[in-house]
Amino acid sequence: MRRRSDMRSPVFACKLAAARRIEKEFSGWHVWVSNLGRYWAVRQGPDARCSRDDPRPMTLDGDDPETLRTALAEAEQAHSVTLEASLLARHAAGITGAASCGFHHKTECGQQ
């Protein structure tokens, strides 16, 4: 059984600082540490709405900062690939203008 972290301890303060650094690296995600010491991230802002075209989960977790960073990086990479595929499909169909994989990240698809 996992022991609860003392939220006033120096160890927990270090974990919170690590969570803030991760949050700065991955905008659009809110990162926190649970009372059991696990790291969690949830999508926030205009990014938070689910879209069937967006492969990112709403919530990710990890036992340590590096595990969560890896999960976030993989989710963001999958999102970039999906957006790029959407732009290529729009371009192939002769559609120009803003393309979006959901509710944000509007990107212009120009004629070539």
Image (cartoon, rainbow, N blue to C red):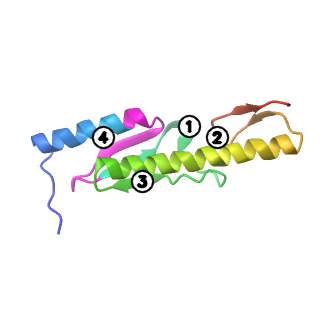
**Residue drawn at x 39%, y 46% as measured from the top left:** 69
Residue 46 spot, x, y in % from top left: 56, 37
Residue type, label 3: Leu
Query: What is the distance, in whole Å, between disc 3 and disc 1 at their CAs?
Result: 18 Å
Query: What is the distance, in whole Å, between disc 3 and disc 4 at their CAs?
Result: 13 Å
**Of the residues tagged 1 and 4, which is closer to the observer?**
4
Quadrant for the C terminus, please: top right
Q: Which mark is residue 19?
A: 4
**Of the residues tagged 4 and 2, which is closer to the observer?**
4
Quadrant in which residue 47 is drawn? top right
Q: Which residue is mark 1?
A: 46
Q: Identify whether 28 is placed above or below 36.
A: above
Dot 3 falls on a residue whose secondary structure is strand
Q: Which residue is mark 2?
A: 103
> Is tag 2's residue or tag 1's residue first in the polypeptide sequence?
1
Q: Is residue 29 magenta?
A: yes
